[in-house]
Image (cartoon, rainbow, N blue to C red):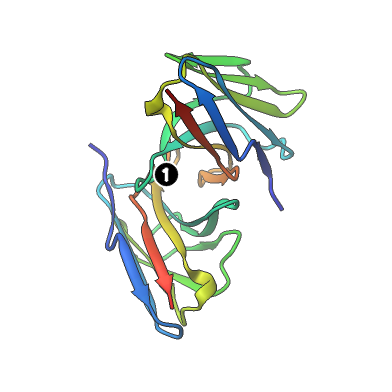
């Protein structure tokens, strides 16, 4: 049972383009939605996160858009660069133990 | 700087062997987690621990056990390794009482191959 559905699984974007990754969830008890970035040979690292009472959060070239009624959220990477090539995971948290539910991941390749 | 370390980056074991994967964090975090990462399946939670000697099953605990004798150390044990346990194993930690403003910190992973 996949509680956080992520798409696409792979994405190829030209340098300077916009990368968009989408996620959807079912559990309305989720109360925090982080995105993680993982480079080959490394563990995932927090990229940006949003709470459900906010519709958008921007940090540099990275923006999360959140639609609470549709139970969907997405990551936009503006002016994508080859250094952004990595695997991106959306995630959702609930509960006091900070148990994280991850999407299946999106492998992004930014080509020059 | 926060640090989660895992005892091995690469490990090759034979079917039926008992395997220990060690994870140590230096942030005094209460909560620790073990995930496995497989292509097309993302990260799946195996076990987590919210205190010393406490443990909770995650989504895929079958074939695994854990041990947390000290706050900083969380071990994953494969009692009798099987080929379907070939995977990347990731350890993570987060402070207790965090309410969405903190993040899980991940180790670099252990790539386990069971022959």
Q: Nearer the viewer, residue A81 or B82?
A: A81
Look at mark 1 in the image and give the residue it sits on: B96
What is the residue that sits farthest to the left in this orientation?
B1
What is the residue that sits farthest to the bottom in this orientation?
B16
Image point 47% across, 82% down: which residue? B80
Q: Is residue A23 above or below residue B109?
A: above
Left or right, residue B2 beside residue B65 = left
Q: Position of residue A75 (x, y in %)?
A: 57, 24
Classify residue B45 by image quadrant. Answer: bottom right
Left or right, residue B59 beside residue B79 = right
Image point 46% across, 79% down: which residue? B81
Image point 60% across, 51% down: which residue? B40
Judge whether residue B31 can be spotted in this image: no
Q: Is residue A7 above or below residue B9?
A: above
Image point 43% across, 59% down: which residue? B89
Assign the N terminus of chain B to one quadrant of the image. Answer: top left
In which chain is the residue bearing label 1?
Answer: B
What is the residue that sits farthest to the right in this orientation?
A69
Q: Is residue B64 above or below residue B99?
A: below
Q: Nearer the viewer, residue B96 or A108?
A: A108
Q: Position of residue A63 (x, y in %)?
A: 53, 17
Judge whether residue A106 can be spotted in this image: yes
Q: Position of residue A36 (x, y in %)?
A: 47, 35
Left or right, residue B102 beside residue A91 = left
Assign the C terminus of chain B to one quadrant of the image. Answer: bottom left
Q: Residues within 10 Å of mark 1 (few under 14, many from 20)?
A: some
Secondary structure of residue under mark 1: loop
Q: Is residue A88 above or below residue A41?
A: above
Q: Position of residue A85 (x, y in %)?
A: 43, 32
What is the residue that sits farthest to the front in this orientation?
A112
């Amino acid at each position: 049972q996949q509680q956080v559905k992520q798409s696409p699984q792979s994405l190829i974007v030209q340098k300077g383009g916009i990368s968009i990754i989408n996620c959807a969830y079912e559990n309305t008890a989720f109360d925090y939605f982080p995105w993680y970035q993982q480079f080959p040979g490394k563990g995932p690292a927090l990229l940006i996160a949003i709470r459900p009472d906010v519709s958008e959060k921007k940090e540099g070239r990275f923006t999360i858009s959140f639609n609470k009624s549709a139970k969907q959220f997405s990551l936009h990477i503006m002016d994508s660069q080859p250094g952004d090539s990595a695997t991106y995971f959306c995630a959702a948290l609930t509960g006091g133990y900070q148990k994280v539910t991850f999407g299946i991941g999106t492998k992004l390749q930014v080509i020059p | 700087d926060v640090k989660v370390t895992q005892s091995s980056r690469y490990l090759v074991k034979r079917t039926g062997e008992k395997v220990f994967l060690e994870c140590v964090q230096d942030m005094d975090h209460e909560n620790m987690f073990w995930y496995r990462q497989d292509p097309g399946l993302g990260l799946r939670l195996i076990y987590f621990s919210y205190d010393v000697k406490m443990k909770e099953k995650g989504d895929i605990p079958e074939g695994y056990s854990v041990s947390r004798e000290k706050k900083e150390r969380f071990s994953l044990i494969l009692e009798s390794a099987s080929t379907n346990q070939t995977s990347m194993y990731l350890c993570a930690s987060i402070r207790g009482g965090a309410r969405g403003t903190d993040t899980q910190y991940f180790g670099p992973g252990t790539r386990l191959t069971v022959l």
